[in-house]
Image: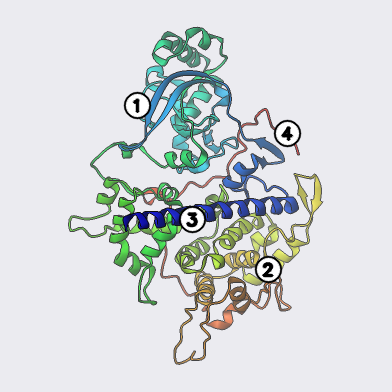
Amino acid sequence: MLDEQKAADEKAKAAAEEAKAQAAAKEEQERKEREAVDGVPDWVDDTPHDARARGYRRSNGYQYARQENFPHTKGKETSVKFTDKVSQPGHLALIEAEQLQPSHMNGQPNVNHFIPEAQPKKRTDKASTISSEKIAANINPAEITSSVTAYTGTPTVNSRGETIQGNNRSAALKSMWKSHADQAGIYKQYLMDHADEFGLKADDIAKMKNPVLVNMVDVDDNKAIELGQHSAQDTESGGVERIKVKNTIQKMGDDMKSFAKRLLESSDDEASFSQLVDKNGNKVLKWMNAKGFISDTQYASALDSDGNLTAEGVNDLKGVMYGSIFQDGSERLEEMFNRMPAKAQRAILATAYRDFNSPEENRMLNDIQESIVAFNELMSDKAFASATNFKDARVAIEDWKRSYQFDDATGEAVLPDGKFSDFALHLAAMYKGETQGFIQQTFNQLFDRVQGSQTVDLFNKDIDNTPRSLADAINETLNINNDGQQDGNVPGGNHPAGQDGLQEGSEATETGGLGEGGTEPANADGGSGEKNSNQRTP
């Protein structure tokens, strides 16, 4: 009996892996076909996954090839400790400073770092810049070349030189070689004096121009991203530690669906999100801890002395659900979201969790992400930026679609019409010109139609609650046809959502915040990073 069950489990596992491989192959083919027609998007609109798949990025008219594995001077074998239970074999490596690629430099994302998911903390804040500069200007060689954990001492990188842990230290070492020659001399001499301890030769170090000592681990991108989610607290016990939203989402990966299903489980269709978190949060935390998504300290910190969820624990669980909005999206998506009107942010946060209850083929996440990117781009259009209502925003969008723009990839003037779906543009206009209540209820209507959960009451007895496809739900709710075009003579369609009882000025009842430990995410415009030797104009 046990043998039969084992065989069945192995067969199911193999089938799941095969399905995952087929889905990945399909996704890659779709990317190639999309880029063959539309071209490679700029870094702002690109996703890290797509950038890694093609092997390069575009930014401001330049192309940045991903750094390949490179020859380096190998030192002694190491075992880098990431948690009390997770260590990764590696070796000390001597590389040139220009080969070291931290996730951020000078407070801006580094275009040559292709695994940004391994750095959940957006190091665009002034404190991070000051910290790395302080290290660079007052280098302590003994401190930055030793440690058994990933969180102090030698930075940990993959075989391409991309930092997995130790981004501030990596940025400091690059800054040291660039701007602090006296400190760089002290550092290089220390490496030569202690070469034997590192399994290196002083002569090899002397021959190098700007040597940097790193811990190099030979791992694939998925493993690097996984290792990047850990923090120094994972090597400690006791104390209080909040759940880190981005780290947790990355750790869960595909299990995010299971998280949502468990958190939203209810026989009461009228239960609010807050009520569901209160009802299911405790058992969901226990599941997360058992699966290794949160540490024992994080689990204990989310509960009070009676074993009930603390207010912080509730907020952290909500944050994980809300944070899924950015999952697999553009690297800059969260920055774009933070620049949107607060009313639009709150409306999206208040309803997006419902998307997990929709069938996979009818989920709205990609459309919501596209609408955020569209809004961000439209705000550079003067007419749209100055619009004060939905109709003016839609008129501005129609004019924008007919205005030629410079394509830095081809050097030609092109029309932006077709860059975004009409659904995404319609949502962008709503974010600009409608109230929070209107936006929120529009999303709820779409989810109700997709999920077959429209309210049946005395005034609405004949509602057809047959679940719709997302395309049909959009058509019924917003008058946008399946081909992406809109009906009606008014720019942007008839905006029929208002005909279904949406009240102007109504307020959302569910709001939530993002960020780690209850803080707001960094708000940054980003930078172009360093140009590498493979840079070229398309």
Name the residue at the right extreme: 412
Closer to the chain start, of discs 1 and 2, is 1
**Contact, CB < 8 Å: mark 1 with mark 3?**
no
Q: Quick check: 424 left or right of 353?
A: right
Q: Determine whether the residue tagged by mark 3 lies in a helix, strand or loop.
A: helix
Residue highlighted by disc 4:
536
Q: Secondary structure at mark 2?
A: helix
Distance, label 4 to label 2, CA atoms, is 38 Å
Q: What residue sits 28% from the left and 60% below the top?
A: 282
**Label 3 sits on residue:** 16
Q: Is residue 54 above or below residue 461?
A: above
Asked if residue 249 is positioned above or below residue 508 in the image, the reply reads above
The nearer-to-camera label among 4 and 1 is 1
Of circles 2 and 3, the one toward us is 3
Disc 1 designates what residue?
148
- Camera-near label (1 vs 3) is 3
Disc 1 residue type (three-letter): Val
| Type of amino acid at the residue the image marks with label 2 | Arg
- Distance from the alpha carbon under mark 4 to that under mark 1: 40 Å
Q: Which residue is mark 2?
A: 394
Q: Is residue 525 above or below residue 317?
A: above
Q: Nearer the viewer, mark 4 or mark 2?
A: 4
The crowding category of the residue bearing disc 2, from other C-alpha atoms within 10 Å (few below 14, some 14 to 19, many at least 20), is: many
Q: Position of residue 202 (x, y in %)?
A: 48, 8
Quadrant in which the N terminus appears: bottom left
Residue visible at 56% across and 68% down in the picture: 362
In the picture, the disc for residue 533 is none
Q: Amino acid at mark 3?
A: Ala
Q: Whole-percent x and y of residue 116? A: 52, 41
Q: Amino acid at mark 4?
A: Arg
